[in-house]
Amino acid sequence: MKKIILILTLLFTYTCFAQSFTSKSKIYEPTSYLSMMEFLQRIAKNSDIIKLDYLGVSYLGRKIPYITINSGTAGNNKKVKFLIFAQQHGNEPSGKEALLAMLNEFSSGLHKDWLKNIELIIVPQVNPDGSELQQRLTANNVDLNRSHVNLRNPEVLGLQKLFYNFMPEVTLDVHETNYYRADWLKWGFIKTARQNMGIVTNPNIAESIFKLANLKALPFVKQYLNKRGYSFSNYLLGNWNKGKPVRFSNLGIYDGRQSMGIYNTLSFIIEGKNGRNITDSLTVRRNGQLANIKGLIEFINKNVIEIKKTVADAREKLVHAQEGEQIIIRSKFVTTDSLIRVMMINIKSNSDTLMSFRFGGKVKPTLIIKKPKGYLVPKYDNLLIELLKSHHIKLEPFKLKENENVYEYKIFADSTQIKKHKNFKVEKKQAINIKRKPYYFVPINQAASNFICLIFEPQSQCGVNSKYGLISDRKLSYFLDENNIFNILRVETK
Ligand SMILES: [Zn+2]
């Protein structure tokens, strides 16, 4: 018996120390939650600059760690704050592995030059339950990367709170993309690029942010990766095998990248190439992700002043947003004549082939409206008020001024049609009897300006699950009263 205990102890010790978290070490299994926690606690204990904290507790009760790294060598307001989060999807472990390897390097004293210019906030694993279960969704079957507006789960609620507390200039959401889909394998070609990186696409995000990302950050990261032997591509979606046009990802603000981007944040998503299963070539996958993350940090490090100024100017416009400014609440993708060339691997011959696809990702606005002075939300609506507070949205007491009118929307659809995301018409008319209910006033001149319009306007296509705003949220389906009047009102100057 003693012998068995000794062997077990030795085995346990070996397993603990076997995981060295360096980028040189080979990994055969995703790091478990317990090993990750042990590692994070150890590096935080041994370092003055690495701090460990928790953003919340998962559905099954696991504490979700985040690390801040701030060397304190410059005034914090001179540094770029960079929030990196990985593994919202539990079956995509390589981003977490990359972040653990990078944290290990910081704890060994590397990357001091980055810390002069950058303050890092790192969440290696947003979805610990899904990771332990090796599944995409959380333990209660929620896709966290579709829940950044409705904050349906504690994991994503905690992540958004972290975002609002730090208000980082740059954010990065790390994923893996599925290369081994059955229809691709049947077709015989898969994408070549090990690393894919996407930028913000919602047309209301400042042009200056879009340009900085598209014209400077992406080419920089591409070159950084290519120099190190990793292939790179813009993150593109499409039914490649059916001759359909390809495009960038959706315009909705429900995911990690766009929900933060809509605050005029320089926000990115990485989609690393996955394996045939969760463990297949995990070391290569981790190293690709690590190089991609480092490439973006290097870009930030070299462009601190421009990034800080671009983001600050763009956010200033939101804080000073004015009634009557335009906001695009519906748009569609249009196919253009231009071709996008993508390197594909022929699976049989294992050779690269450059293929051309029509580009179908030009964004054409189909419904543009004017921002009101603000919105009215019913004070008694605890669920809604709590949600707005979680999003750090400013609420003020409301008293109608003489030069103001209040408008309501009559909706020409019932709640079932709305839930099914059918298109519907609305009629805006002056509200009567608003004195019957007490309201909070939600001004549009705040950081959340665009966010507010996109979730409040009933016809908005960009709020929840890419279709419509909060009106289509199942939990808030009481939004229509008996006369089909929408519960959120617009305040406009006469
Ligand atoms: Zn994912």
Image (spheres, grey):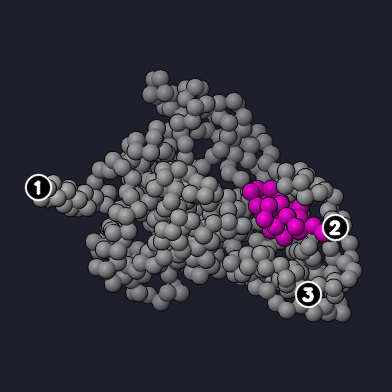
Does the magenta segment cover residue 470?
A: yes
Residue 220: x percent and y percent?
43, 50
Q: Nearer the viewer, mark 3 or mark 1?
A: 1
The number of callouts visible is 3
In this figure, which residue is indicated by the disc labeled 2?
Answer: 482
Distance from disc 3 to disc 1, alpha carbons, whole Å, reads: 73 Å
Amino acid on which the number 1 mark rests in the picture: Lys
Q: Is mark 2 within 8 Å of ligand 1?
A: no
Residue 5: x percent and y percent?
14, 50
Q: Earlier in the sequence, mark 2 or mark 1?
A: 1
Distance from disc 2 to disc 1, alpha carbons, whole Å, reads: 75 Å
Q: Residue at x 64, y 48 (%)?
A: 465
In this figure, which residue is indicated by the disc labeled 1?
Answer: 3
Classify mark 3: helix, strand or loop: loop
Along the viewing direction, whichever of 392 and 309 lies nearer the viewer: 392
Classify mark 1: helix, strand or loop: helix
Position of residue 5 relative to residue 305, above or below, is above
The label on residue 186 is: none
Rendered image quadrant of residue 263: bottom right
Marks 3 & 1, CB-CB < 8 Å contact:
no
Start and end of the magenta stretch? Answer: 454-481
Residue 335: x percent and y percent?
67, 36
Q: Residue at x 27, y 49 (%)?
A: 23
Q: Is residue 191 left or right of residue 94?
A: right
Does the magenta segment cover residue 321?
A: no
Amino acid on which the number 2 mark rests in the picture: Glu
Can the viewer see residue 160? yes
Along the viewing direction, whichever of 129 and 369 lies nearer the viewer: 129
The label on residue 438 is: 3
Position of residue 236 relative to residue 15, above or below, is above
Distance from disc 2 to disc 3, alpha carbons, whole Å, reads: 19 Å
